[in-house]
Image (tube, rainbow, N blue to C red):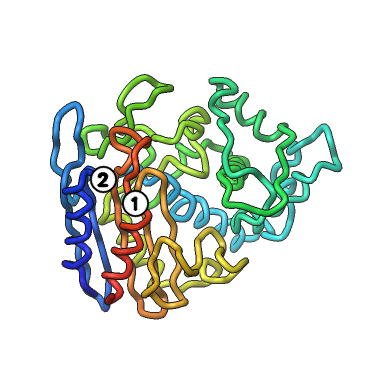
């Protein structure tokens, strides 16, 4: 594992102004390394990135929190993964009992094997979380011809968790080292949000998650150490369902290694991973018992620039896997 080579690549990206800074963490053969580079904040004043900086993990929420919790309820027999969501949400598209949305299963949502659109600006339809949940459940969704990775799958799974557990997402325990409500001063800021009219720091960057008051697709915060701790627990537990292929590119929740994916080409076929829009990522190679996380706030202070995060992720993955 060339951890130092990976850090060099990160420093090149920082020096070029593509990202403010990053925290890199890796586990291999019982050895664990963690390092910070660059800035946590550029505006309103520069602040250094630290190993303990808290990140908006964005879509890593899907695998660290929601997937784990849904599979936990499946193991307990609370849900059958091959049953439709209506087993828990009977009011889904309740005004049309023949609606295709009523046939979608838990497993299909976990593997992004549904016809839902990739994303929808739900936050533009209102400001009341309960009303927006009703909108998600009763909307006649545009049906795609081919399944794509969709936030809607995990917004629905978040509603499933709320129905089963009888509380909102933000009231649930997100697991050791993670939070839905961090102290702002500990966080790497994300974007100057045109909708909210301020720099986002210590609150979720994702507009839909913010408007919903918590959701299954985003909203989790954590440090590099917390993400590595989670990865270590998964390596010790073994792949299980999260390693089981549902398609050429997807497992239960996670992305499988495939050509051109964000984890690079040098990892084994037993590798899974996931990324987050804010600039985060986590990968686990069960064959070599190696894991790595690259956490950046590449959307700071704006998403409307080319950060090169895709190339950087692949380069870091290949460096850590010996290329």
Which numbered circle lies on residue 18?
2
Instruction: Give the vertical position of 196 relative to 108 (above or below).
Output: above
Instruction: Give the vertical position of 191 relative to 274 (above or below).
Output: above
Asked whether 162 or 203 is in front, the reply is 203
* Residue plotted at (20% across, 41% down): 40
* Residue plotted at (34% across, 57% down): 311
Q: Assign the C terminus to one quadrant of the image.
A: bottom left
> Looking at the image, can residue 161 be seen?
no
> Looking at the image, can residue 212 be seen?
yes
* Residue plotted at (56% across, 63% down): 250
Q: Which residue is mark 1?
A: 309
Asked whether 45 or 153 is in front, the reply is 45
Instruction: Give the vertical position of 221 relative to 193 (above or below).
Output: below
**Residue 19 drawn at (x, y percent):** 25, 45
> Which of disc 2 and disc 1 is earlier in sequence?
2
The CA span between labels 1 and 2 is 8 Å
How many marks the image carries: the answer is 2
Tag 1: Cα neighbours inside 10 Å, few (<14), some, or many (≥20)? some
Mark 1 residue element = helix
* Residue plotted at (37% across, 37% down): 303
Mark 2 residue element = loop
**Residue 167 drawn at (x, y percent):** 54, 37
**Residue 53 drawn at (x, y percent):** 22, 45
In the rendered image, which quarter is residue 118 located in?
Answer: top right
Q: Are marks 1 and 2 in contact (CB under 8 Å)?
A: yes
Left or right of 200, for residue 7: left
**Residue 274 drawn at (x, y percent):** 44, 57
Which numbered circle lies on residue 76?
none
């Amino acid at each position: 594992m060339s951890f130092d080579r990976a850090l060099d690549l990160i420093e090149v990206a920082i020096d070029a102004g593509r990202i403010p800074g990053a925290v890199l963490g890796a586990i291999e053969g019982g050895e664990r390394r963690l390092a910070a580079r660059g800035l946590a904040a550029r505006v309103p004043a520069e602040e250094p990135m630290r190993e303990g900086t808290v990140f908006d993990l964005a879509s890593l929420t899907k695998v660290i929190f929601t997937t784990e919790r849904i599979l936990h309820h499946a193991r307990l027999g609370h849900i059958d993964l091959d049953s439709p969501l209506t087993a828990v949400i009977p009011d889904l598209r309740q005004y049309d009992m023949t609606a295709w949305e009523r046939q979608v299963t838990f497993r299909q949502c976990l593997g992004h094997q549904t016809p839902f659109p990739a994303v929808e600006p739900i936050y533009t339809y209102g400001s009341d979380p309960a009303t927006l949940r009703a909108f998600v459940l009763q909307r006649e969704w545009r049906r795609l011809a081919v399944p794509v990775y969709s936030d809607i799958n995990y917004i629905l799974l978040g509603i499933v968790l709320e129905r089963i557990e009888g509380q909102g997402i933000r009231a649930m325990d997100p697991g050791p080292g993670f939070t839905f409500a961090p102290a702002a001063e500990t966080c790497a800021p994300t974007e100057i949000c045109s909708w909210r009219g301020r720099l986002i720091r210590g609150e979720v960057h994702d507009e839909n998650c913010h408007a919903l008051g918590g959701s299954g697709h985003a909203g989790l915060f954590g440090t590099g150490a917390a993400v590595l701790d989670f990865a270590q627990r998964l390596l010790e537990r073994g792949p299980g369902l999260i390693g089981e292929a549902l398609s050429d590119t997807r497992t239960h929740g996670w992305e499988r290694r495939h050509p051109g994916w964000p984890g690079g080409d040098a990892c084994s076929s037993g590798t899974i991973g996931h990324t987050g829009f804010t600039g985060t990522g986590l990968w686990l190679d069960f064959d070599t018992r190696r894991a790595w996380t690259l956490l950046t706030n590449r959307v700071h202070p704006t998403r409307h620039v080319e950060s090169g995060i895709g190339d950087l992720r692949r380069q870091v993955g290949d460096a850590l896997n010996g290329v």
